[in-house]
Image (spheres, rainbow, N blue to C red):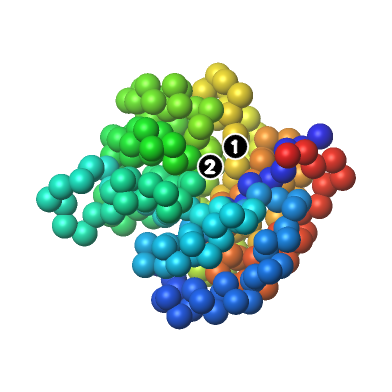
Amino acid sequence: MKNKPLMIANWKATKTIKETVEWVKKARPAIEEISQAAVVICPPFTSLPFVSSLFKGTNVKVGAQDVSKFEKGAYTGEVTVEMLDGLVNYCIVGHSERRRLFGETDDDVIKKVGLLLEYKIKPVLCVSDLAQLDSYIERGRVIIEGSEQIIFVYEPPGAISGGGAYRPEDPKEASASIKKMAEKIGKKVFTIYGGSVNPENGLRFLAEENINGALVGQASTDPSTFLSLLNSVRFDNVVD
Ligand code: PGA
């Protein structure tokens, strides 16, 4: 029996407020009726208050794409965890794009995970490979201690579409890597896969034993594509 899959939409740096309004207009109410999957939408910061208030009290949860490693203070341009408090239930951390393009380090990621846990926001922790997980575990006790609250995403950077062609990892290989990740943590953890998940391949990933959901970039930015991905997720024995 599989748990209800957690489908996290990562819009990345796409969508103005106007485009967000259009997405929401098209996707509602169908998205609020989805019962076979738990849905989280991570819009850019500018659209976050709007999306958050719109879906308040519904099945659809909202997440941020990042958070500052600093708390309140003289940090021009940063969005702190306190600012996210009450707006989001989830927050993506350590995405490979932030590491590669913005120089985010393992220590930064660990600080962010710690802050999010303090505020009871679930970290959606991206892990590119097993070596990166080792480094997180070595540097931060919070990774093991908070593991029950963390959503671990196995997301090999080479599988990310980046808005271009889809190039997913083989579902069986992804599942095997995820199993090893969970073994390293040594506790029962919630693990999902990210990288080129779309309506054509989604079910093949989610049918794998260790894959309890997906972090979805490109296929989440168009409402009808995201809805057809969500509608493709049909297990006979889904439990809450
Ligand atoms: P993709 O992005 O689905 O476009 O590959 C996933 C991600 O980077 O989170």
Give the side of residue 78 with respect to residue 136, left or right. Answer: left
Question: Would you place residue 73 above or below residue 199 in this image?
Answer: above
Neighbours of disc 1 within 10 Å: few (<14), some (14-19), many (20+): many
> Is the residue marked 2 within 8 Å of ligand 1, measured from its CB?
yes
Which residue appears farthest toward the front when viewing the image?
A: 57
Q: Give x and y (percent) for residue 149.
A: 51, 32
Q: Within the image, what quadrant is residue 105 found in? A: top left
> Of the residues under marks 1 and 2, which one precedes in the sequence?
2
Q: Within the image, what quadrant is residue 56 found in? A: bottom right
Check disc 1 and report its element: helix, strand or loop.
strand
**Residue at position x 82%, y 47% in the image:** 235
Q: What type is the residue that disc 1 sits on?
A: Thr
Give the position of the C terminus as an image quadrant.
Answer: top right
Give the side of residue 203 with respect to residue 93, left or right. Answer: right
Question: What is the tally of numbered marks visible in this picture?
Answer: 2
Q: What type is the residue that disc 2 sits on?
A: Val
**Residue at position x 60%, y 76% in the image:** 25
Which residue appears farthest toward the top when viewing the image?
A: 186
Residue 111 seen by the camera: yes
**Residue at position x 77%, y 59% in the image:** 232
* Discs 1, 2 touching: Cβ within 8 Å: yes
Give the position of the N terminus as an image quadrant.
Answer: top right
Residue in front for this viewpoint, 199 or 190: 190
Which residue appears farthest toward the left when viewing the image?
A: 74
Q: Give x and y (percent) for residue 133.
A: 44, 31
Give the side of residue 11 with respect to residue 76, left or right. Answer: right
Check disc 2 and report its element: helix, strand or loop.
strand
Residue at mark 2: 153
Residue at mark 1: 191
Residue 168 seen by the camera: no
